[in-house]
Image (cartoon, helix red, strand yellow):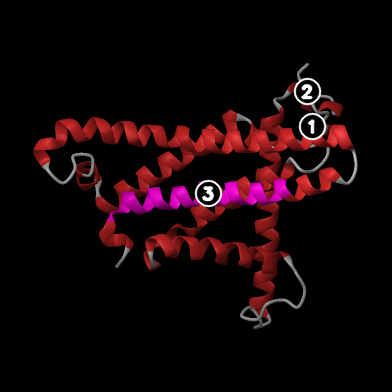
Amino acid sequence: MEHHPITWIGLIPGLNTLAPHTVHATLVALLLVLFAARANRQLAMARAAGTHLVPDERLSTRNLAELLVDGVRSITEGVMGPAGRSYVPLFGSFFIFILIGNLMGLVPGFAPPTSDFNITFGLGVASFLAYNAIGVRSQGLVNYLKHFVGPIWWLGFLMIPLEIIDNLVRPVSLALRLFGNMTGDHLVLEIFTDLTKLVIPVAFYFLGAFVSLIQAFVFTLLTVIYVSLAVGHGEAHH
């Protein structure tokens, strides 16, 4: 028998007619907007007081945001160098959205939007469009398309189809990797929670949180690599 977990959406008239992954993805987006607004407000207050260079004494939204941004910046600069800093907002948006979406599945009554292929494929397509747009903007359309020909122009008839296939596979690969891992992780958690109820599921919650973090990291890192390849070696490392 197929297992259908009970979610809060099913208890609210109107929302229960919508696809759960759509509602949860929208909720994650709203949470991100609220998080960013609160962090920005706290940073503005710190700047007004002249203490914006000093971290808050307690864990605040501003401190958490700075920690996340600094982590994404470190990943980006490790791959692209200082030139990658301008793309940190893009990579950070991917990372935080996916992380919160993954962790949402650990909360009783919620379903992770990233365990639905429609959401993960949408993220993969967004990554695909982003790195191609960045490549065209940074190099120009003609120079960007030259990359598809390869280093030897007369091998273009062979390289162009391979490059096109490689690029078209990337969003599907990103989507399937995230979808498969998050679906399997939360399915295991649900099964052991139903079987044991107490104690043992706690270990799987910690494992689920770790997997959620790793999958958000992997998706973001691959997007960073794709952007680095799109902008070209020269811009990425000078």
Residue 179 appears in which quarter of the rendering? Answer: top right
**Of the pair 50 and 235, the residue shown nearer to us:** 235
**Going 90% across and 43% down the picture, which residue do you hit?**
198
Q: CA distance from mark 2 to mark 3?
A: 29 Å
Looking at numbered disc 1 in the image, what kind of residue is underneath it?
Answer: Ile
* Spot occupied by residue 82 in the image (x, y as percentages of width and height): 39, 68
| Dominant SS type (magenta) | helix
Residue sitting at the far top: 1
Residue extending farthest to the left is 154
Task: Look at the image and tell me whether residue 117 can be seen.
Answer: yes
In the rendered view, would you say 7 is above or below 231? above
Q: N-terminal of the two: label 1 or label 2? A: 2
Left or right: 154 with respect to 223? Answer: left
In the rendered view, tell whether residue 16 sits above or below residue 88: above
Q: Amino acid at mark 2?
A: His
Q: Which residue is mark 2?
A: 3
SS at circle 1: helix
Question: Which of the 4 image quarters holds residue 114?
Answer: top right
Residue at figure coordinates x 27%, y 58% from the top left: 233
- Eyeballing the image, is 5 above or below 67? above
Mark 2 Cα-neighbour bin, 10 Å: few <14, some 14–19, many ≥20 = few
| Mark toward the start of the polypeptide (2 vs 3) | 2
Bin the neighbour count of mark 1 within 10 Å (Cα to Cα): few under 14, some 14-19, many 20 and up. few
Q: What segment is highlighted magenta in the picture?
A: 207-232
- Label at residue 218: 3
Where does the image place residue 73, in percent across and percent down from the top left? Answer: 50, 64
Q: Secondary structure at mark 3?
A: helix
Specify whether 46 is left or right of 133. Answer: right
Q: Amino acid at mark 3?
A: Val
Residue 161 place in picture, x, y as percent:
24, 30
